Amino acid sequence: PTCELTYKNAKAVLCGSRRLGLIKYVMALMNGARLGIAAQSVGVSELAYREALAYARDRKQFGKAIIEFPAVYEMLSVMKAKLDASRSLLYACARYVDIYKIYDDLAKDRSLTPEERKESKYYSRLADALTPLAKGMGSEYCNQNAYDCIQIHGGSGFMKDYACERLYRDARITSIYEGTTQLQVVAAIRHVTTGTYLNLINEYNSEEIKPELQSLKDRLVAMTERYAKAVEAVTAVDDSAYGDFMARRLVEMAGVIVMSYLLLLDANRNENFKRSAEIYTNLAEAEVCKHADFIANFKPAEVEIYKVN
């Protein structure tokens, strides 16, 4: 429960070290919570997809199950792709967190070697970069999947007879607490401007993949080039208001490319992910093109017309 705490004449003992409260302890606490919400978002997305799939298979209109209608099976396939992409990003982020925390534990018992310190710093940076992506993108996809789950149910989805109306309420908080999606963009944008995401994308690109997946990889390379040009175009303008205005678009571009690569690598290990990799890449490609075109055609001075008096 969230409540107000009032202390009167309470004795206090310092926990931790001085000058580390906000930067180290509070942010570590927030990042841990954000990763948990990313996991919660994946869980809600999973159930939303299952409920929608089951209903679409069972519900019949015009003599056939509604899952046979293109408008419905496209919606379901996109839900599954968003779910798989969210889970892949969550697992990648959790792995980076696990590794750097292992080094933190080792450092309590002995001094780390220069190589270990370098690796610890590397994984800490990746964990810091992927946490806002996992929370921000995962919670938004969670909300979208919950919305689409109700849409597939039609009027029935609005009633308490089915689980999807509860899922919609469960989903809504994920993009709000422990930092709204807008605050995740604020946390993530420095990893756009410092090149953390681009370096990670290039690392993923260096992985060997099966020949049948090469066409997907080629598309991701082209998307990465558009992303890099968009980042360069925005950072070249010495205008903080313009940079803040474009931050969401740049972060989303980085997010969908990272998630596309993670699904590509999943498909490289297990062919069951190939379908989601293909569908999500289609989705990501459209998002990258949309944001890249917006940035290319937008004049910094136009930010003024968006300001509400």
Image (cartoon, rainbow, N blue to C red):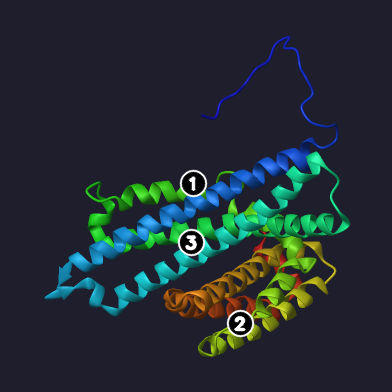
Q: Are marks 2 and 1 in contact (CB under 8 Å)?
A: no
Quarter location, residue 293: bottom right
Which residue matches tag 1?
A: 173
State the residue at coordinates (31%, 75%). 73
Q: Which residue is mark 2?
A: 220
Upstream in sequence: badge 2 or badge 1: 1
Q: Earlier in the sequence, mark 3 or mark 1?
A: 3
Secondary structure at badge 3 equals helix
In which quadrant of the rendered view does residue 108 lie? Answer: top right
Kind of residue indicated by mark 2 = Leu
Residue 309 in view of the camera: no
Q: Position of residue 164 (x, y in %)?
A: 32, 53
Q: Is residue 79 above or below residue 232?
A: above
Circle 3 sits on which residue? 141
Relative height, residue 19 to residue 258 (above, below): above
* Residues under numbered marks 2 and 3 in contact, where contact means CB atoms less than 8 Å apart: no
Number of other residues with Cα within 10 Å of mark 3, as a class: few under 14, some 14 to 19, many 20 or more: many
Q: For residue 57, what is the image quadrant? A: bottom left
Q: Is residue 121 left or right of residue 227?
A: right
Q: Whole-percent x and y of residue 231?
A: 74, 74
Q: Is residue 192 left or right of residue 288?
A: right
Cα separation, mark 2 vs mark 1, equals 32 Å
**Residue at (43% x, 53% y) in the render:** 43
Q: Position of residue 201 (x, y in %)?
A: 68, 74
Numbered disc 2: secondary structure: helix
